[in-house]
Image (cartoon, coloured by chain):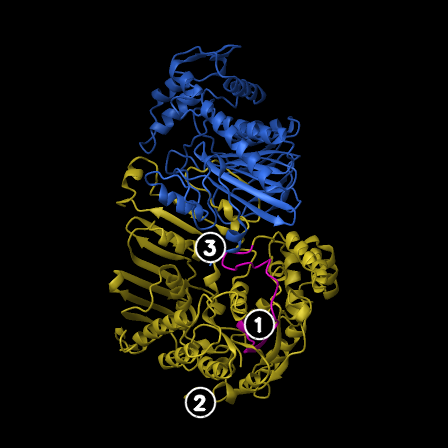
Chain colours: A blue, B yellow
Amino acid sequence: MPTSQERNAESRAPRGFASVTASHMSPSTPSRPGNDLSAVLAGMGFRTVDPEPRMEENVRVRRGLRRATWSAPSMRTRVSVTLVHPSRDLADAAVGDAFTELDRVVSLLNRHDGTSAVSILNQRGGLDDPPPELSGVVRGAVEMHRLSHGAFDATVKPVVDLLRGWKLRGPVPEADLREARALVGMSALKVKERSIRFEKGGMGLTLDGIAKGHVVDRMADVLLRRGLDRWLIDAGGDIRASGTNAEGRPWRIGVQDPLKRDGFPAVTELRDGAIATSGGYENFFTEDRSVHHVVDTATGQSPLHTLSASVAAPTAMMADALATTALVLDPARAVALIETLPGCACLLLGADGRRRRSKRWRSVSESHL
Amino acid sequence: MSDESVKDTEGQVESAGIGRRDVLKALASVPVLGVFFAGWYEKKLADDAKREAIMAELGLEGRAPAVIPDAISRPPGDRVRVGIVGFGGEGESLGRCLGFAHPDWIEAEARNNLENPANRTLEVFMGQEDLNVSITAVCDLFDVRAERARAAAANADGPGGATAGQATRYRRYTELLESDVDAVVIATPDHWHTRIALDAVAAGKHLYVEKAMTRTEEEAHQMYDAVTASDITFQVGHQQRQSETHIKAREVVDAGVLGHVSLVEVTTNRNAPWGAWVYGIDDRGTPATIDWEQFQEPSENKVPFSPERFFRWRCWWDYGTGLSGDLMSHEYDAVNQILGIGIPDTVVSSGGIYYFKDGREVPDVWQAVCEYPERDLTLMYSATLANSLYRGQVFMGHDATMQVGQTVHVTADQYSTRYAEKIAGDVIDPTRPMFSYNPRTSGVDAVTSATAAYFAQRGLLYTYRDGKMVNSYHLHIKEWIDAIRGNAETSCGIERGFEEAITCHMATRAYRENRKVRWDPVARRIV
């Protein structure tokens, strides 16, 4: 028996999007080896980073109002766009354009893709005539380095790679760590009008702490250019939103519990702005999670004093970078820094159980799990 | 006749330092609850548009669980007149799921919400769909509960308020069956289920029977024969059938994610008096207010009036089957829903009274092992009433393990054949769930988190399926009402009920007869 949501979902699949409703796939689902399982699970509401088909649905919320939600795997997570609009066709078209922009920007910034501009930069140690997109993000990284007084450092790649390589093999030898740290430093990154260069061989750039936010902002630009004002973009927890949700209320954002218990430590609202969270609880290199993907360049170690740092900011790129920054910094310094930045607020969940909030942080609700 | 003890809410309203007036004032001042009540008065006008606005305010529009087709949008059909037999804890709960709560309960839950805003029991209740039913008849052997049932049926402050009215109290269920009720809810102790059901079927009444479906194997055959020969709509009260996680789990199994499942472990562990059926004894329950002789009428073992036996009947074989019918029945039915295993080939069981040495007859620590050789599968049930370690339901396949509870987690087995390549390639980490589903995370539009490496605990396209916001009992009884109107099928009809009953009776007999029992599928008898 078809479900209500199946009946309500009037799926379309432009631009290669497979149509997936609650429990079935359309014949247009791309067939890749081993993809059937992912597709079925995706249709059930599971999310994985194993390649999945893109999914879209467009449901009538009430008379004269629809909600279009599309999602697709990208940047090793899922990216989704929810748009509230009276017109099904316009909503689908706008969201489709946003995903086209996603693909375009990611193709330039994905360091896991050996052919991307940032990969070529890392391989060659320099890049002439870089795509404006890459230059823009790198300049953003430089600016965030300045704003964070050095805590945000996109040249930390050699250290992260070293730690990742030593995953489960015990402590990283001190000499190796020292050598990798010597390759870190934004001052050795030269960004000019028509070139990007590392001054030391072996240096590398990771845009993980900023690129996702940048991509979200570019997708937001597409929607804003169309004059759309009720949408939410979610790239694996980096979120930017505009206007109100389908119920006419500000978008409600749950802050993930780093310990993965049921419920959210806090729920906040987002109307026109962005929020991002950084933490070591999803991507770690040792079983005890003492070494994870965020590294303090001052020590070469992963910060452990803060389990989760959520930052609200005007743009997703700022929120993304500042969340990483706030995770790295001593909590008191992190809050002090965020409070100096216009339109920014933060909530830090400490390993000691303490919660620290900047003055502008507003929770709709908080629970102490 | 009554099911388990009612929590006595009368007299408690003033006890916590907050007066009735305070509660009512607070109801008006708490935004969410204010919306409920304002919304409800609008809904009373039977205006669909306004009803939709209420649901929108509750964030429930378009969020009907998938198991309830058109739960929000379909207009109610003809009003269904319901009679409830047994208004103990379970009967009162089912009454609320039909849309009718005792005023004391509403006040108590409003107070609970004020003291703890995270307690959303009242919100969930008020958000229920109006099923367009009336409770027109009630039958309970305890005067206090019978009057409580009538008060609930007449209470307009609830989602069923538009159809609230005066219910007639009957002292014998046969009189209730002679009334104009269309459908009957049986929420009595188990030893009454079959007798009432057989007469109800003969009277052409639709039936909702609480689990366990019957107390004995012979009764299961009788009920099966009667129901299958009739045209009535029948549902057994395994409300977990409506659980989102169970539905997801079934989809995982059907997708072949787990590989061959050879062992399923399910448990019920409790560690509190209520969990061991030591319910409060209402001091208003006396021979003058309880029809004790009628209570024990179907029982061969007649004893003098016993409040313990009346309020704590699950502790005696005369009225139920202990852990088997009360709790294993739920766990078995969940596995049956997810795997479709049917009746086992053999069952052995063991246990004893190891903690609650209070005069009870049924064990408080008990295990049953059900074998399905044709499926190369063992189902192991384990229960203690003296430890509350929660272990959920564990489905162990060659390729992956699935844990089902409030969430579903699927973790690849480190020696899986199917995932070997992905495990070796660090695509799948066998120490962490590959997939996870948590219906509780709905209620927000998005979750900000560190980027998930393999999964996120929410279903992107299921944000409008909020398992926490919808009472599964309500969904289950709604499904029954929908089926009565011809708009749905019951998910736990007589076939599934029969399988549950026979499996539990096999386990009970294996314990009581201290032997391995077998199901003869040809003779359809336990041997």
| Marked residue chain, label 2 | B
Q: Which residue is mark 2?
A: B302
Q: Residue at x 59, y 48 (%)?
A: A60
The kind of secondary structure element at disc 3 is loop
- Residue situated in front as seen by the camera: B25 or A191: A191
Whole-Å distance between the Cαs marked 2 and 3?
A: 42 Å
Apparent side of residue A224 relative to residue B416 in the rendered image (left or right): right
Please give the range of residues in magenta.
B64-91
Regarding residue A333, the answer to whether it shows in the image is: no
Query: How far is disc 2 from disc 1 in space, using C-alphas?
Result: 27 Å
Q: Tell me which amino acid carries mark 2.
A: Lys
Q: Are marks 3 and 1 in contact (CB under 8 Å)?
A: no
| Picture quadrant of residue A312 | top right
Q: Position of residue B365 (x, y in %)?
A: 37, 68
Name the mark nearer the viewer: 2 or 1. 1
**Mark 2 or mark 1, which has the lower sequence index?**
1
The one nearer the camera, B62 or B100, is B62
Question: Position of B151 compared to B324: left or right?
Answer: right
- Looking at the rendering, in which quadrant would you find the C terminus of chain B? bottom left
Q: Would you say residue A103 sits in the magenta stretch?
A: no
